[in-house]
């Protein structure tokens, strides 16, 4: 789902700034969460990336349903959270590369676990976020 842009067809400075500010927050949080999880759980399995993908999926599922069905939200929040923050906080490119690296190292069971964990658990996280948003 693409968030509404306040002025359709026009990329205003405000739109660019909202997306950029969300991206700054998301990218920095992604880095710090990944580093923290790597220290907390030393492993060849990319737990940090998985946790980030799950939490980003939950946040996006919750936020988009909550602001679509439960509350009247200024469309600028959708630019900040959905387009800026979630897009840079979620790490699907890292997920894809880490899975590829595991596969290349011959760690097929771990690579498959990462694929299953990321795709299935993130889908469940979106559904849980949406369910929570609908329940409040």
Image (cartoon, rainbow, N blue to C red):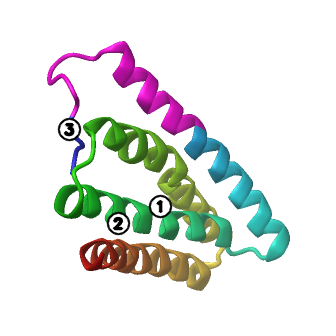
Q: Are marks 1 and 3 in contact (CB under 8 Å)?
A: no
Q: Considering only order in the chain, which callout, 3 or 2, is on the residue closer to the N terminus?
A: 3
Q: Is residue 85 above or below residue 56?
A: above
Which residue has dot 1 on it?
56
User: How far apart in space, not on screen, are marks 2 and 3 (Cα)?
Assistant: 17 Å
Foreground tag (1 vs 2): 2
Question: Does the segment drawn in magenta span residue 125?
Answer: no
> Neighbour class for label 2 at 10 Å: few (<14), some, many (≥20)?
many
Which residue has dot 3 on it?
4
Rendered residue at 49%/28% (across/down): 20
**Image position, residue 6 (x, y; %):** 22, 28
Rendered residue at 54%/76% (across/down): 114
Mark 2 lies on a secondary structure that is: helix
Q: Considering only order in the chain, which callout, 2 or 1, is on the residue closer to the N terminus?
A: 1
Q: Mark number for residue 62? A: 2
Region rendered in magenta: 5-24
Q: Main secondary structure of the magenta part?
A: helix
Q: 46 or 79: which is nearer to us?
A: 79
Rendered residue at 78%/76% (across/down): 43
Q: Considering only order in the chain, which callout, 3 or 1, is on the residue closer to the N terminus?
A: 3
- The answer, for residue 46, to whether it is visible in the render is no
Mark 3 lies on a secondary structure that is: loop
Residue 121 position by quadrant: bottom left
Q: Is residue 110 above or below residue 21?
A: below
**Image position, residue 56 (x, y; %):** 47, 61
Residue 127 position by quadrant: bottom left
**Image position, residue 25 (x, y; %):** 59, 41
User: How far apart in space, not on screen, are marks 1 and 2 (Cα)?
Assistant: 10 Å
Q: Is residue 70 above or below residue 84?
A: below
Image position of 41 (left or right of 24): right
Q: Is residue 11 above or below residue 107?
A: above
User: How far apart in space, not on screen, are marks 1 and 3 (Cα)?
Assistant: 19 Å
């Amino acid at each position: 789902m693409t968030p509404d842009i306040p002025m359709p067809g026009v990329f205003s400075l405000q739109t660019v700034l909202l997306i950029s500010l969300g991206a700054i927050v998301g990218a920095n949080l992604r880095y710090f969460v990944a580093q923290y999880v790597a220290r907390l759980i030393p492993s060849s399995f990319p737990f940090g990336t998985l946790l980030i993908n799950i939490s980003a999926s939950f946040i996006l599922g919750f936020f988009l349903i909550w602001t679509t069905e439960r509350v009247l939200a200024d469309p600028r929040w959708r630019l900040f959270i959905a387009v800026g923050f979630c897009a840079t906080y979620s790490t699907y490119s890292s997920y894809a590369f880490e899975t590829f690296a595991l596969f290349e190292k011959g760690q097929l069971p771990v690579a498959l676990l990462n694929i299953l964990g990321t795709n299935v658990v993130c889908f469940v996280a979106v559904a849980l976020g949406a369910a929570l948003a609908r329940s409040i």
